[in-house]
Amino acid sequence: MKKIALILFISIMLVNIFYTDASAALDTRFITLAKTPVNKLFRGVINIFTFFLEIPASMCDSSHRKNMLLKTANGIVTSFVRLGTAIFDTITCVIPPYDKPILKPEFAVDSLKEKSQSVIY
C-alpha cells in the first residue's frame, strides 16, 4: 500500500512540474467575438436601445448646406433605418456573416461621436 501511495505521490508531483497552466499557454489576444453570432446579437441589441442617437448625430453634421429641419428629418429617417437593421441583426444573429454590419459605422454611438467631433474641434 505504501508503494502505491508513493508512486501516486511521485506521479502527481511530476504532472504538476511538467503541467503548463492553460491560461498561460492560451494566447487571448486572438480570441474575439467578432466572427461569432454573439457579435451580431450584441450589435443588434445595442442599436435597438441607441437608434435615436442618429437624430442628434445628423444635427451635428458639419455640412452647412442643409438647414436644421432637413438635418432633423434626415436623422429621423436614419434612426428608423438603424432600428430596422438592429432588429434584422437581432433576429438573424445565427446566420453569417457575423462581422459585417449593414450600416456604417457599426453603432449609433460611433456615428454621434464621429459627427460631433467636427462640431467640437
Image: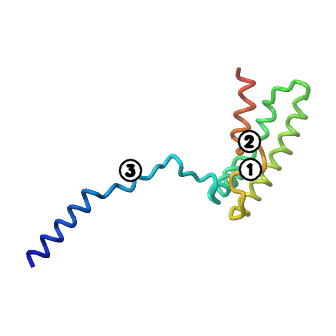
Residue that label 1 marks = 101
| Furthest-bottom residue in this view | 1
Toward which corner of the image does residue 14 lie, by quadrant? bottom left
Q: Could you tell me if the residues under marks 1 and 2 are in contact, i.e. CB atoms within 8 Å?
A: yes
> Crowding at label 2, few (<14), some or many (≥20) Cα neighbours within 10 Å?
few
- Which callout, 2 or 3, points at the residue further toward the start of the chain? 3
Q: Quadrant of the N terminus?
A: bottom left
User: What amino acid does circle 3 point to?
Assistant: Ala
| Furthest-top residue in this view | 121
Q: Which mark is residue 24?
A: 3
SS label for mark 3 = helix
Q: Nearer the viewer, residue 12 or 62?
A: 12
SS label for mark 2 = loop
User: What amino acid does circle 2 point to?
Assistant: Pro
Q: Quadrant of the C terminus?
A: top right
Q: Which mark is residue 105?
A: 2
User: What amino acid does circle 1 point to?
Assistant: Pro
Q: Nearer the viewer, mark 3 or mark 1?
A: 3
Quote the CA–CA distance across marks 3 and 1: 33 Å
Residue 95 rendering spot, x and y as whole percentages? 72, 64
